[in-house]
Amino acid sequence: MEKSALQIARAAYQPKLPVALRGNLTVVEGEPTQSVADQEEVERLFPNTYGMPYIKFEPTEGEMTTAQINVGVILSGGQAPGGHNVISGLYDGIKKLNKKNKLYGFLLGPGGLVDHKYMELTDEIIDEYRNTGGFDIIGSGRTKLEKKEQFDKGLEILQALDIKALVIIGGDDSNTNACVLAEYYKAIGAGVQVIGCPKTIDGDLKNEAIEASFGFDTATKVYSEVIGNIMRDCNSAKKYWHFIKLMGRSASHVTLECALQTHPNVTLIGEEVEAKNQTLDDIVTYIAEVVTDRANLGMNYGVVLVPEGLIEFIPAIKKLISELNDMLAANQKDFDLVSDEHKIDYVLAHLSDENAAIFRSLPLSVSRQLALERDPHGNVQVSLIETEQLLAEMVEKKLSEWKKDGIFTGKFATQHHFFGYEGRCAAPSNWDADYCYSLGFNAAMLMGAGKTGYMSSIKNTFRPADEWVAGGIPITSMMNMEKRSGEMKPVIRKALVELSGKPYKFFVRHRTEWARNTSFVYPGPIQYFGPSEVCDRPTLTLTLEQE
Amino acid sequence: MEKSALQIARAAYQPKLPVALRGNLTVVEGEPTQSVADQEEVERLFPNTYGMPYIKFEPTEGEMTTAQINVGVILSGGQAPGGHNVISGLYDGIKKLNKKNKLYGFLLGPGGLVDHKYMELTDEIIDEYRNTGGFDIIGSGRTKLEKKEQFDKGLEILQALDIKALVIIGGDDSNTNACVLAEYYKAIGAGVQVIGCPKTIDGDLKNEAIEASFGFDTATKVYSEVIGNIMRDCNSAKKYWHFIKLMGRSASHVTLECALQTHPNVTLIGEEVEAKNQTLDDIVTYIAEVVTDRANLGMNYGVVLVPEGLIEFIPAIKKLISELNDMLAANQKDFDLVSDEHKIDYVLAHLSDENAAIFRSLPLSVSRQLALERDPHGNVQVSLIETEQLLAEMVEKKLSEWKKDGIFTGKFATQHHFFGYEGRCAAPSNWDADYCYSLGFNAAMLMGAGKTGYMSSIKNTFRPADEWVAGGIPITSMMNMEKRSGEMKPVIRKALVELSGKPYKFFVRHRTEWARNTSFVYPGPIQYFGPSEVCDRPTLTLTLEQE
């Protein structure tokens, strides 16, 4: 494939490593760890990988070599910038341990392990992908590694290829499964270590040892670039309210980071909506009030940021969707016989009064979507709801009522946008390039140290890479028990936006000023070659959290 | 307002000027010009500004100074990257002519001239905006300067401020009006020169003297960045067809340039659709064939680029819309009384059989939009049609028919995107920063040379700035007579994509290969500080046209 000029120039970039990973290293063990909650239950489920210590690598004298091993790697779930650098870091790391070590990539996600689809990754292949975006080196996929049969099937190919260690690059669920696999392989004495790497643009895999999931830095910079461009347009044309929805699943980290970078007039944070038990009307009223305030100041324009997961955080809507799913599951046969044009009536007749009232208050396009479009399990497809349009329409309706009452005297015209795919495969920023390369290199060192059930951990990432701290954290230490499909399961606790956290608090301190004034900031595109203060700045979330 | 790190670093960039504009200069006149068509009629309408020669500036010895003059500047129409650099170039240019010269900016577009809203632009203000995107320094607007009363009203404030020259930065229509104004002021001896500057991301203001309209370079680079990111995601996840609509009004220049930069599987060019008299079904069939071909090769994913103006270029749709507008105008009162749910039936009953059949073939969402949503003049709002969704739905329908017939055996899932506002206010690329600054500086020199009715022209822009050629072209030379709102008017001829041009031909030579293979190119974000081959490359359209 033809390469762009930037891709060619960027290939030469040598990612920075923490000092401990530059030469020979030694392992420093901390205290035994506990899971974040439900300790007894988690320990019972992970007898072989529970309670291990946090470990840290420190530089030491001498040459580093280990016996020859083969290593496998898997990309799991949605794309995030820097995945290729995790793999090139891993590759360089295992080659440093022993030049004869080999790396195999399983194709199109965890399914590749189960279906025995793989390729050997060589110098030539790795060099093609250094510092590039995407997961296309081996592809990714969403198969969940959960069952014993999958583990056993996987072990066949691992043994056939003489693979002694497997690195799984994924989000919270994939790392949970990595740990289940580590536990199983250890329990049966399979002789295969499993190490996880924290990936997701959503930023919701985060704790004391994992300061950020990779990709969050780059993706939020790409979104902030285009948000900034739209803001400058907004502030030049002075005639539109732009409603911008941002990817990020349930958590609002992406939206919060982009807000910190660009200062929109309105930013909705799902976690706050839930904590305050807000209704859809509360949210619409809040936006309409900001619009009215600005109109009174002569500004009939602005920018609203909406997190993808918002709708699920509105308690009333959450209840409605839950009843809708249960009701439709119970009446599926009946419902399938109802013609499309009568489905909304059917739904209204079968919901509780409270939820029927909520359903009736939604714009037709949304109620139609809720009634007609379902996923293969028969569930309402919340992620398809165009929240940015929904809010724009509902705010417009409210403002036209206020206009009749003389409360609103301005103009209100809207544009809407949704950004997600634009940022997931961008080439990694310097920060992500370094962080990912270090995560991968470090994963190799964890394998070299004989560890399993650990996640690669690089800390102190707010500081220059020289001061980064490399180590590993037992995955079980991040777990608690949660209900999944009706059953209690051990899972890594998802990190939502903390309302007591510094990034959120910084936002709250400034949002009134950002609402009334036009305080837009235009971050511009990611730069790779300029001054350090432009090219190497970490996210504001990380900066505020670590400061 | 808080500035981003990049904005601060970028402020220091000193845009490059053509050699002739660096010191004292002399005017070299060419032969008298003719309008591109309808010479007699255009000459009759522009007795004072018709037939003037193309002029070129050449460097000469000595110091440059002119008598003190005040200058006005107007931003007209949609935003384009680099507008602030045109103004800073103009400012530096008039200061070079005479340090006492003053620059006034009229606010929010041509309306600011008519309504006497303006501000003086000072060193301090100009320095805040160097190399930034947006038009927010003085704002833009869409008021058309067409009437004698507007010209007279404008002259009052020009005289009150002692402004002897006015620069209008705009697209084809705004420059047409600039010329009408130049002619009028010359005819009445008002003593005000008028100079135009070629602005539009659409790229449709282009001819021998105007190699590109400013903003096209930057906007297409931003769109290509996000298209490339989506492509990398597409090629990693391998499960979606992404339908991407791009701004650009009627002409498909933006879409063609982005296709040349990124190599999508399908690119639709409006001008080709019209030339080949294609139907909507022809287009849908073509896309469905590419999807089927790729599915047969195991690739159920790809990228389709759709120009904003496509729908207007489909001859059958064009006819339908035209009959729809006429029919509704004739029956407006009746139609307004019809309830929304019966409007589609009403439309069907009142259209010719041929157009009713076309109307019936459209997806419901589109026919509803055509029947229900109209602009203030009662016209169908073609630009609101979500062509990218329309095509995705129609291709899906066709493929499900083909599936029944066993022709298509793959999967087809889609995502859609529309990019426009993301690129219009991006900070200018080096090329646009230099070009815009040169256009503005050069406009000052045209004023210094006593010219009016000219457009600022910078040629040879495919070469390094050292070799750029500065001069001016009489606006009348770009004109022909066209029907506007029922009347024949002199207008600058719009430059559509030429099917005999090199960029289009290059695309046609490669599109089959791009369709069947995955030949995606990932251009990445605009770089300002890196190697020249990354930071200074002009558009591929310009490169192919000028090579």
Image (tube, coloured by chain):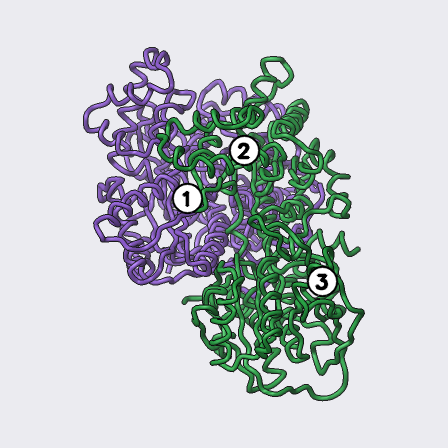
Chain colours: A green, B purple
**What is the crowding at mark 3: few (fewer than 14 residues within 10 Å), some, or many (at least 20)?**
many
| Residue A34 occupies quadrant | bottom right
Judge depth for marks 1 and 2 and give the one in front: 1
Q: Tell me the subunit letter for badge 3.
A: A
Per the model, the C-alpha gap separating discs 1 and 2 is: 36 Å
**Quadrant of the drawing holding the N terminus of chain B:** top right
**What is the crowding at mark 1: few (fewer than 14 residues within 10 Å), some, or many (at least 20)?**
many
First in residue order: circle 1 vs circle 2: 2
Residue at left offset 35%, top offset 60%: B299
How many numbered discs?
3
Q: Amino acid at mark 1?
A: Lys
**Quadrant of the drawing holding the C terminus of chain B:** bottom left
Instruction: Return the residue found at the far left.
Output: B353
Image coordinates for residue B356, horizontal then vertical, percent:
23, 27
Image coordinates for residue A228, horizontal then vertical, percent:
60, 44
**What is the crowding at mark 2: few (fewer than 14 residues within 10 Å), some, or many (at least 20)?**
many
Q: Amino acid at mark 3?
A: Ser
Same chain letter for marks 3 and 1: no
| Residue corresponding to mark 2 | B166
Q: Identify the element where label 2 is drawn.
A: strand
Residue at left offset 34%, top offset 60%: B514
Judge depth for marks 3 and 1 and give the one in front: 3
Same chain letter for marks 3 and 2: no
The numbered mark at residue B245 is: 1
Per the model, the C-alpha gap separating discs 3 and 2 is: 70 Å
| Residue corresponding to mark 3 | A477
Per the model, the C-alpha gap separating discs 3 and 1 is: 47 Å
